[in-house]
Image: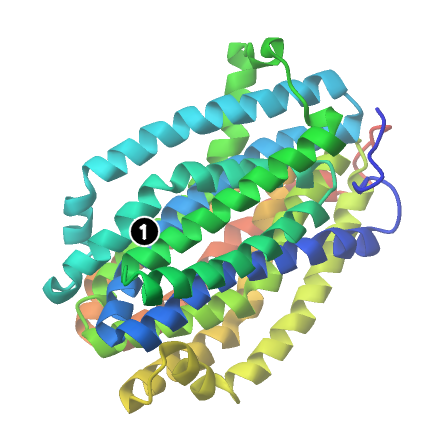
Amino acid sequence: MKHSKTALNLTQGKPVQLILLFAIPVFLGNLFQILYSLVDTKIVGSILGETALAAVGSVTILYTLLTGFFNGLSLGFSVITARFYGSGDEKELKKSVAGSILLGFITAAIIIFLVAAFLKPILSLLNVPAQQLDMAADYITLLVWGMFVTLAYNLCANMLRAIGDSLTPLIFLIIAAATNVALDYLLILNFDMGVKGAAAATLVSQLLSVVLCLIRIYKAFPILHVSAQDFVLTKSRIFSMYESGLSMGLMSSLVNFGTLVLQSGINQLGTNIIVAHTAARKVCEIWGLPVSVLGSSMATYCGQNYGAGKYDRIRQGIRAVLILGGIWDLIVLILAHTISPYLISFIASSQNEEIIYWGTIYLRIDMSFLLVCLFIVILRNSMQGFGDYKTPILSSSIELVGKLVFTFVFVRLFGYWGIIWTEPVIWFLMVIPLIVMTLKNPIFRKHGEAERSG
């Protein structure tokens, strides 16, 4: 198979250098995606006020839940593509690309129509405050229907990353981020669209990045071009695609659904707590981004090397990213205990002492345990790459159950303190099966495995 000059072959060369070369564009791309949401939050808070910000914050987790599922679904599909790229099987690679498109949009249609049909009951379950309900519904309705665009971008970006090109999605996301900022001001200020303007700006920006990705794939990556015959899928292919795609999608969904349940508890604690938590979560997204990017990069890295039968490189890669992630976690710990109040005040566009206090407390406590989260993210994404789909779902199920318990028991007893301690406690429970099953996997038995030739 002929490799593109702009794509990385992750099966050859020093693992740590390749992972960084691959991960840095992914990190920057994800950073710009977060900027979509951060700009929305900042503009909504500063222009439309705290009530509007609380309305957006009260339903943001639903958007995150859907986005996370579709990103996980497309990433799981792309792991299959990465394996065929690593093994050099171009015919099977094209079929996996076609399968990703077909199964992705069929799945999206079912989920989006169901969510749209039951949106009012969902908002009721989220305990969105009555004074914010109309604005919250306006905001999330646009984003739900726009999930087709979100899926299209994730499919394009993850296909490119599967063959080692993480730079192209970054370039187009930078363009889209700049467009998003301009549209935010145009639609909210000039057209007086309120929270609908923030949602519309995000969708138009994503659509732009989709168009640019498709043009790039058409011109530069014939390996990703598919024909009608590639869309003919056997039952075994559908099963293997869904096994990987739904595993990663469900892994993300279980995590985010647990957070959605938790948000329903937060929404009962008042506007100040909602705003404080919304601002704090934005900071967490940025600080946790290097960890999540290293995780998603390891899914592709392990996928390519698993396809090539180079298990020793998988071990080397995991060790390297755990060290890199540990260094970043130390930096985050220092930041959390120094500049948190200023970040909360800036993002929330507020000098309210209660908002700043609770946002700061949340960051200082939860970020002190980010190292445990690092092991969770790296191990479960790596497992997806080398074919262990069950253990990551087990770990994510533990998180869902834990958040249900905290929401319906501890939040009622201890208020926001119950929210603050939810993730640190659950992280320690989640990491146990991941570590145990990683050590049991034959790939990590140096003297008891036979490396397959690539």
Q: Where is residue 139 in the image (x, y as percent from the top left)?
A: 28, 54
Q: Is residue 439 visible?
A: no
* Quarter of the rendering occupied by the N terminus: top right
Snapshot colouring: rainbow
Most distant residue in the front direction: 190
Q: Position of residue 76 (x, y in %)?
A: 56, 35
Q: Quadrant of residue 49?
A: bottom left
What residue appears at the point 41 percent right and 68 percent down from the top-left corner?
A: 281
Q: What element carries label 1?
A: helix
* Quarter of the rendering occupied by the C terminus: top right
Along the viewing direction, whichever of 338 and 239 lies nearer the viewer:
338
Most distant residue in the right direction: 13
86 versus 268 height, above or below: above
Q: Quadrant of residue 82?
A: top right
Q: Where is residue 140 in the image (x, y as percent from the top left)?
A: 28, 51
Q: Where is residue 129 in the image (x, y as percent from the top left)?
A: 14, 64
Seen in the image, is 15 located left or right of residue 153?
right
What residue appears at the point 54 percent right and 65 percent down from the top-left corner?
A: 288
243 versus 63 height, above or below: above
73 versus 412 height, above or below: above
Along the viewing direction, whichever of 189 and 259 lies nearer the viewer:
189
Report crowding for label 1: few under 14, some 14 to 19, many 20 or more residues within 10 A (C-alpha): many
Q: Which amino acid does label 1 sit on?
A: Leu
What residue appears at the point 24 percent right and 64 percent down from the top-left corner?
A: 55
367 versus 296 height, above or below: below
Instruction: Give the labeled residue for mark 1.
Output: 62
Q: Is residue 139 visible?
A: yes
Q: How many labels does the image show?
A: 1
Q: In which quarter of the image is residue 266?
A: bottom left
Along the viewing direction, whichever of 304 and 113 lies nearer the viewer:
113
